[in-house]
Structure formats: C-alpha cells, structure tokens
Image (spheres, grey):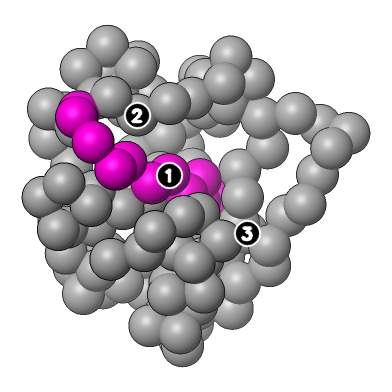
C-alpha cells in the first residue's frame, strides 16, 4: 500500500492503464478532486485520493466536503486504508457518512481490482 497521497497516485496510475488520468493541481478552486478520469466508455469522472494510516477517520477539508455535497454524481473517493491493507472506493454522495463514520462506511469496492473494474465500466448512465 502507498505511504502518502503522491505515492498512492503513482500506484493508481500504474495499475489502471485503461483509464486516462489528469492530475488536477488546483489552488484557485479549493476542494476540487485530485484526479479527472476518462475511461474507454468515453466517460469523465472525478476522483479524490485519501490515505489513512491509522484509525477509521478520513480527513476532508471543508472545501472537499462542500464539493462532494454540491456534485454527488460522477464523483468518487478512493481511500488507501493502510491499517486494513485495502483500497476502498466510495461515491461522492457518501461524503456525509464518510465524515461522520470514516472507514466504517460501506464502500462500493474494497480491492484495487474491484475499484478499477467499477471505474472502467462507468457510463453516462451509472
């Protein structure tokens, strides 16, 4: 598992070759997710990366929370859960539960392979 968000990004990029990623380094619009993804179904989506090294709490800025509350569809949060040696994918619409319950929130997928499969298969109807 990754040790920090930058290493997590490289790990994700290396292991999801079918998705075209654009890393968003944005200081003008706080809260914007880390990545813009584009899959083989010609579908765009955003992905916020988080790394949890201990406990259940996932740290979000107020801007990140606001972004996901305003954009609950087509936004996802990918968490490197180093404590449990897993990668979890959540819908952006789960932000409130993630803030309140952290990693106790049920993810959409719990392995990198399942996360990759889900993101690869996204379509406009998903």
Measured in 3D between alpha carbons, the distance from the residue under mark 3 to the one under mark 1, in whole angstroms, is 15 Å
Q: Is residue 114 left or right of residue 7?
A: left
Find residue 76 and report its image quarter. top left
In primary-sequence order, the first of circles 3 and 1 is: 3
Residue drawn 61% across and 72% down? 21
Instruction: State the residue in front, 55 or 111.
Output: 55
Q: Secondary structure at mark 3?
A: strand
Labelled pair 2, 1 in contact (Cβ < 8 Å): yes
Q: How many marks?
A: 3
Q: Position of residue 115 (x, y in %)?
A: 26, 64
Q: Is residue 48 magenta?
A: yes
Find residue 93 and report its image quarter. top left
Measured in 3D between alpha carbons, the distance from the residue under mark 3 to the one under mark 2, in whole angstroms, is 21 Å
Measured in 3D between alpha carbons, the distance from the residue under mark 2 to the one under mark 1, in whole angstroms, is 7 Å
- 38 lies above or below 83: below
**Residue holding disc 1:** 50
Give the number of the disc on residue 58.
Answer: 2
Give the number of the disc on residue 36.
Answer: 3
What is the span of residues highlighted in magenta in the rendered image?
Answer: 45-56
**Mark 1 Cα shell of 10 Å, populated few (<14), some (14-19), many (≥20):** many
Q: Position of residue 11 (x, y in %)?
A: 42, 75
Look at the magenta stretch and give its main secondary structure.
strand
Q: Is residue 71 magenta?
A: no
Labelled pair 3, 2 in contact (Cβ < 8 Å): no
Say which of marks 3 and 1 sits in front: 1
Q: Is residue 116 visible?
A: yes
Say which of marks 3 and 2 sits in front: 2
- 41 lies above or below 86: below
Q: Position of residue 105 (x, y in %)?
A: 16, 28
């Amino acid at each position: 598992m990754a040790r920090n968000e930058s290493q997590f990004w490289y790990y994700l990029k290396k292991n999801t070759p079918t998705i075209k990623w654009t890393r968003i380094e944005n200081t003008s619009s706080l809260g914007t997710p880390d990545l813009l993804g584009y899959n083989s179904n010609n579908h765009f989506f955003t992905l916020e990366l988080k790394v949890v090294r201990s406990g259940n709490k996932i740290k979000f800025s107020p801007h990140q929370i606001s972004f996901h509350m305003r954009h609950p569809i087509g936004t996802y949060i990918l968490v490197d859960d180093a404590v449990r040696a897993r990668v979890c994918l959540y819908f952006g619409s789960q932000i409130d539960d993630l803030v309140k319950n952290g990693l106790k929130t049920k993810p959409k997928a719990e392995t990198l392979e399942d996360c990759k499969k889900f993101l690869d298969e996204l379509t406009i109807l998903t």
